[in-house]
Image (cartoon, rainbow, N blue to C red):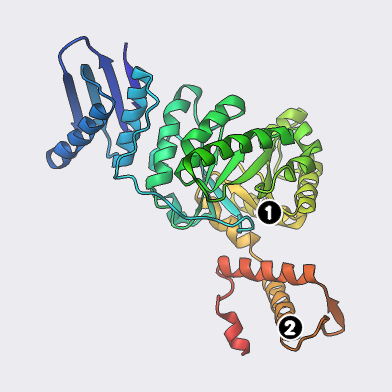
Amino acid sequence: MKFTAGNCGPKVRSDCYVEIIPQEVGGINLTLESKVLPHYGDSIKEKIDQVLKFYEVENVKIDVKDYGAFDWILLARLESAIRLMTGSTSEYLPEILSENTLSTKKDRNRFSRLYLPGNSPKMMINAGLHKPKGIILDLEDAVAFPKKSEARFIVRNALRACKFYGAERMVRINQGKMGLEDLDYIVPHGVNLILIPKCESDDQIHLVNSRIEAIKSHLAISHSIWLMPIVESALGVANAFSIAKAASNVAALAIGLEDYTADLGTRRTNDATESYYARCQLVNAAKAAGIQAIDSVFSDVGDQEALKQNVLKSKSLGFDGMGCIHPRQIHVIHENYAPDDTDIEKSKKIYLAFKDAQKRGLGVVSLGTKMIDPPVVKRAETTINMAIETGKLDKNWEACYE
């Protein structure tokens, strides 16, 4: 019987394939194929030997096909195959894997988030260079069922080893029991936000949080881990508000329109009339709970104009951001979720009037003949922050008014 992990073939890049066959005797019989064998063969063999010794593997035939895999990818593939063979639950985390320590705030801007398949490490290596606000390592729909186990090791090591250039580190877990098991692989390793798919009740939030808290308590983890439930059914839409307010670490509520329209028995269209009610319900539920509303992905990666119109409609409904499935969509999302010049100028005037009133000790803020209440000031600050983050306003803009 053989145990395998990874991908192989002429089109594979930045990955490797591991095949292990147990033997009764004979020690370690290693075959290594790699284009960099003359330069890095000894180093690769040393790392393989390190993992085999950790798991006390003594008699195996092991074939490794290297396609330019980073160390953390090689180690994830080896560990996955060995644990399939041995049934071991010991966690192997060598020193080469550095700990990511970036923490994020609940109200952080999340107007773009890029989905990456959890079993495709080549996509993770440079994903942060495209500057999405968040990177989602997907363990659910983007991973074929037979590959879900090994994807956990890739996602775990990517959380520890990949530099995402400031993007929030997100993971979409699987549904039900499998999703709860996914948490063991991501909670200890620097995940910032967890997406809960097919969410239909607040009970699902409580189950996930119970598992998260148990893991954090056992390992003395203190950093916040935010949740983003994804509503993807008619029942989920009906229960959106109870889901949104289920726990204090629910930072955003998202909608998944592919599954939602399938649940309705209708077809998803670019003008989105079939999902108008659901999107409005979700936005209202999120805002009532004081959290962000995140729109669905736009699946046609080749139609940038249709994406732009979708973003503008999404923004007009009150959404704070949306998902994307290709890096080319990020710029369009940022550019069109960004406030326009009129909104920026108006927000600057409101913010400056508020600051001036504070300096003068006034309890009432006015701009011209209009009174300005706290929610308006907060919205102006949000607009200014988004303008800065999207490059439409210099972060030192106030200096021009001093």
Above or below residue 72? Residue 23 is above
Q: Amino acid at mark 2?
A: Gln
Residue under the image location 70 percent in, 44 percent down: 247
Between marks 1 and 2 in the image, the one whose residue lies nearer the viewer: 2
Q: What is the tally of numbered marks visible in this picture?
A: 2
Residue under the image location 35 percent in, 48 percent down: 98
Task: Name the one closer to the observer, 68 or 54.
Answer: 54
Residue under the image location 37 percent in, 46 percent down: 161
Which quadrant is the C terminus positioned in? bottom right
Lateral position of residue 83 relative to residue 376, left or right: left
| Cα gap from disc 1 to disc 2, whole angstroms | 40 Å
Above or below residue 151? Residue 167 is below
Secondary structure at badge 1 equals helix
Q: Determine which of the numbered discs, if any, sits on residue 309 in the image.
A: 1
Please provide percent x and percent y for residue 8: 32, 28
Residue 241, quarter of the rendered image: top right
